[in-house]
Image (cartoon, coloured by chain):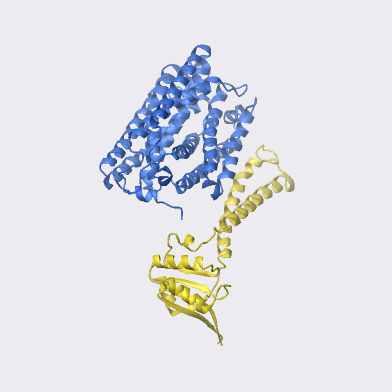
Amino acid sequence: MSKVVGVLGQFRDPTALVHGAEAVRDAGYKQWDTHSPFPIHGMDQAMGMKRSGLGYFIGLCAFLGAATGFGLQSWAHAIAYPAIIAGKPLFAWQAYIVITFALLVLFGAIGSVIGMLLFNRLPRFHHPVFYSDRFESCSDDGFFISIEADDPQFDQENTVRLLKEAGALAVDILEETDE
Amino acid sequence: MMTDHSLPEINNAASWQRRFWILGALGLVVYLTGLWTDPEQFWASGLLNTVFWITLGLGGLFFVLIHHIAGSVWSVNIRRQAEAVMVGLPWMLLFALPLLVWGVPHLFEWASPDAVAAHPVLREKAGYLNPSAFRFRSGVYFVLWIVLCGLLYRVSLRQDREPHPDLIRRMRIISAPGIFVFALTLTFFGFDWVMSLDPLWYSTIFGVYIFSGSYLVILAFLILLNLALRSGPAWGDVVTVEHYHDLGKLLFAFTVFWGYIGGSQYFFIWYTNIPEETVWYLHRWEHGWKWVTLLLIVGHFVIPFLTLIFRASKRNLRVLLVMALWMIAMQWVDLYWLIVPTFHPHAPHLSWMDGAAFLGIGGIFLGIFWRTFTTHPLVPVGDPKLKDSIEFTNS
C-alpha cells in the first residue's frame, strides 16, 4: 500500500527555479517549497511569501525579558529584601536598567532561535522530498520545487503538468510506502 | 558613465541657491544686531548654532569615511550629497573664527584670569584650558578637516573623469587613517567647545555622545534632502524606497546608540554619585530645565524608537519625512541642552538670536552645500558601483 504525498520537480538553474516558483505561486498553491544549494535573491517574492511574524515573536520575548529583569530587581530590592546600598533609595530604578537591558537582549536572542525553529516547524527528521533519489543533488547543483499532496489545489496529473509547463526538467512522484 | 540609468536632475537649482544665500545674509544681519543689544547672548547663540552646523558637517564627513572603508554599494548614489555636506565643514571656520578671536572670554569661565586665580582646580587645568591653547587646538582641528575633506572630495571628482577602480582604493586609503583623525578631532572638539563650558565637569564618553548626534543629523538631513529632490527628473528612479529604508535603519540604529551613550553617561555619574560630576545633571534638572531633559528623553529616544522600529515606517516616505525633520530639531535641542544651561542656569531661555543665528549660519552652510552639490555631477558617474547601488534592494 503506498500513498502519494507530493511531487518534486527539478529545474535547470536558479533563473528557471525562480520562474517555476512564480508559476506555482500564480497557480495559487499554498503547501509547497523551493529547494536550492544556496539562497537565491528574489525568491521570497517569486514564491509570494509574506513577511515572517518572527519579529513580533522576538519583540514579545524581548519585552518579557525586560519586564522580568526590571520586575525581579524591583521586587528583590524594594520589597523582599529592602536594604540601603551605596546610599541609593530602595527603589533605585536607574540601577536596574543594565540588567533589564541585558535580559531584554537575552530573551530576544533565545526567542529568535526558538521562534525560528517553531516558525519553520523544526526539528523535523524526515520530509517526503527525501523519497526522491534525485533530491540528493540539492546540496550540489539541483534546484527543486516540491508541492505537497495536502495542498487543497493538489491534483496529481494537473500538478505534474503545471511543473512541466513551468520548466521542470523532470518530475518525481513522492510516494510513502507502509513497510 | 557607469550606468545606463538616466541621471537625476534638479529643478530650479539656481533659485534655491539664491534663497539659501538670502536666508543666510538676512539671518546674519539680524543676528549681528544682537551684538549691541545683548553681547553675552550673542556669543552663546553663536556657539550653539556654529556647533550645530559643525556637527552636521562632521556627520557628512563620517558618512563618506565609513562609506569608503566599508566599500558600501547601497550608498554610492547618495555619496555626492554627503560629500557636499562634508565640504561645508571646513567652511564653518568662517563662524568659528569670530568665536575664537573675540568670543572665548565671553563663553568660557576658564578664559577669565580672575576665575582661574580663584579656583585651585582651574589653576591646575590651565595648562590645557587656556585661550591660546584652545585657539591653537581649534586651528589644528580645522586644518585637519580642510586637508581630509579636500583630499576626499578631490579624488571623488577625479573619479567622474577617470572611472578607474583604483580611485576607489585611493579613497579607502585616505579614509582609513582619516577615521582616526575624525574620531580624535571630533572628540577633542566636543571636549573643548562644549564640555569645557563647565570646566570642572568631565565625561570621557562625551565625544561619543557628540558623534552619535552628528551621525543622526546627517542621516536625517540626507532623508530630507532626497525627499525634497524627489520631484526632480529621475530622482525617484535613482534613489528608491530601498535606499530610504537603509537610511531609516541607520536612523533607528543611531537613535538607539544615542540613547545607549546618553544613558551610559548618566548611569555612571548617578551610580558613583560624586558631587563634582552630578552637579552637571542637577543644572539640567532644576529651574525648569527638567522639561528640556524630559523632552530629550521622549523626543530624542522614545518617539523615534517606537516609530522607526517597524519596517513599514522605514519604507513610508511620509513617516520618514516627519522623522527626519523631528530628529534634526531634536539634535538642536540636544545641543541646546548641553550648551545653554551654562548661560541661563535659572530657566530655559530661548532667544531670538538663537533663531537668527540658526538661520544665518544655516543659510550660509546650505548655500555652500548647494553650490558644491549642484556644480558637479549629482551622482558619482564614474563609480563602477553606481549601477549596483541604484538597483540595490533589501531582499
* Depicted A107 relative to depicted B152: above or below: below
Residue A98 sits in quarter: top right
The residue positioned farthest toward the top in the image shown: B36
Q: Nearer the viewer, residue B135 or A179?
A: A179
* x, y percent for residue B258: 53, 39
Front-lying residue, B362 or B67? B362
- The answer to whether residue B95 is above or below residue B326 is above
Q: Taking the image as drawn, is residue B275 in sight? A: yes
Residue B73 visible in this rendered orientation of the protein = no
- Image quadrant assignment for residue A119: bottom right
Residue B183 located left or right of residue A78: left
Q: Is residue A81 left or right of residue B32?
A: right
Q: How many marks?
A: 0
Q: Is residue B106 left or right of residue B101?
A: right
Chain B on-screen colour: blue
Residue A78 versus residue B147 in the image, above or below: below
Residue A163: x %, y % from top left? 46, 73
The quadrant in which residue A114 appears is: bottom right
Image coords of residue B352 (percent x, y): 55, 20
The yellow one among the chains is A
Q: Looking at the figure, which quarter contains the N terminus of chain B?
A: top left
Please, is residue A158 above or below residue B293 in the view?
below
Which residue is rendered at x = 39% and y = 32% of the image? Answer: B13
Residue closest to the eye, B332 or B370: B370
Residue extending farthest to the right is A79
